[in-house]
Image (cartoon, helix red, strand yellow):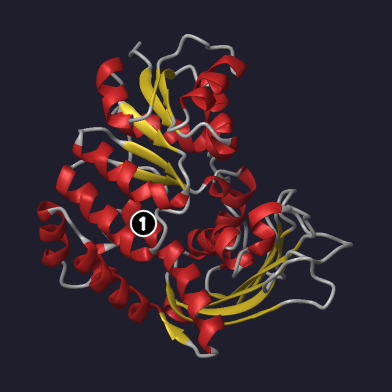
Amino acid sequence: MSAPTRLVLVGAGGMGKAWLATILGNPDTELAGIVDLDLDAARKAAADAGVPDVPVGPDAVELARRTGADAVVNVTIPRAHHPVTTAALFAGLPVLGEKPVAENVAQGLSLVAAAEASGQLFVVSQSRRYNPHVFAFKEQAKALGELGTLSTEFYKAPHFGGFREEMEHVLLVDMAIHPFDTARFLLDAEPVSVYCEEYNPSWSWYAHDAAAAAVFEMTGGLRYVYHGSWCAPGAETSWNGSWRLSAATGTATWNGDDAPVLDTPDADVAAAPSADPGDGIAGSLATFVAAVGGGPVPMGEVHENVLSLVMVEAAVESAETGARVRVDDVLDRAYAQALADERRDDVRAVLESWTSVRDALTPAR
């Protein structure tokens, strides 16, 4: 039996504690240390998890070197994703990071290039893909053959308090990346353009628009339609949303919680058995550790992941401008920004070698 993969966890906040429990619960991983700028928070997280003697420190690379860690799990706030991940990759450490890949698409492209320049694995945990029902839904999509429209309805009424109730574009920025990413996975298609409107019901307790409707054109002529609200009390959907897939030979539906349902008049249409990807962040961690040990590249590898964040940025731009937005225009502007902002010559050299940003994001697919 191989030795457990030793991991440094970066971030001791709420999500950091969830990842801490997941790392401790995986027999193939060992917690090497906890990193946080607030060392007291790191020590408290360790003590609360029953591992009070685990090393802590303010710097991921330094602590990884001191403890002999094999990889890093980056659960910092989005604006710290780029510097923490870049430093770890160039220290020879594979990284598993929380979504979004970075604070913006430009930084996401820099991290794609950093992964290439360093030769290290960087995976973004889109944990909602790790759901057996999502995989069953995907097999139903394959069985239906020629697809037409996929739609998601998301209606919840959470009273978060704090920063979320003051955020601009709160639903699109804080939540919509989950269904957007799932849509890409289910359809095996990528975004081409989007038209999006945001609005705020009169009874909303959010300072800015907390509801949105978006229509994405996807490759192959498919359409993905999203309609969601965070101030919709009564008859709330699952946190995964409610889904409908329309195809030439029938329809598949998923309520977000239970097994999806295939409805077709064609007796020859049947979905193949689906794999069990594991559950949430535990599934994400397991596939990352397997990849570090020489296994297949997991879902969410940085090349494959960036277009999910692009969908968010494009939807926000459309809502702000009132115009249909081409995804390639978003990519081109982000690429120019990435080049302008890049401070590492080796990363810039990789960026400059790309002849097409969209093509650069496809090698891991």
Determine if residue 301 is in view.
Answer: no
Determine if residue 185 is in view.
Answer: yes
Q: Which residue is mark 1?
A: 304
Crowding near the residue tagged with mark 1, few <14, some 14–19, many ≥20 C-alpha atoms within 10 Å: some
- Left or right: where does residue 82 sit relative to residue 46? left
All told, the count of numbered labels is 1
Front one among 211 and 52? 52
| Residue at horizontal 11 percent and vertical 65 percent from the top | 353
Front one among 362 and 53? 53
SS label for mark 1: helix
| Residue at horizontal 57 percent and vertical 38 percent from the top | 15
Residue 284: where, in percent of width, then height?
48, 38
The residue sitting at the right extreme is 234
- Left or right: where does residue 58 sit relative to residue 268? left
* Vertical order, 292 against 238 (above or below): above
The part of the image, by quadrant, that contains residue 9 is top left
Front one among 237 and 253? 237
Residue 214: where, in percent of width, then height?
60, 78
Residue 153: where, in percent of width, then height?
71, 68
Q: Quarter holding the C terminus?
A: bottom left
* Vertical order, 112 against 47 (above or below): below
Residue 221: where, in percent of width, then height?
47, 82
The residue sitting at the bottom extreme is 323
| Residue at horizontal 34 percent and vertical 52 percent from the top | 302
| Residue at horizontal 53 percent and vertical 39 percent from the top | 277
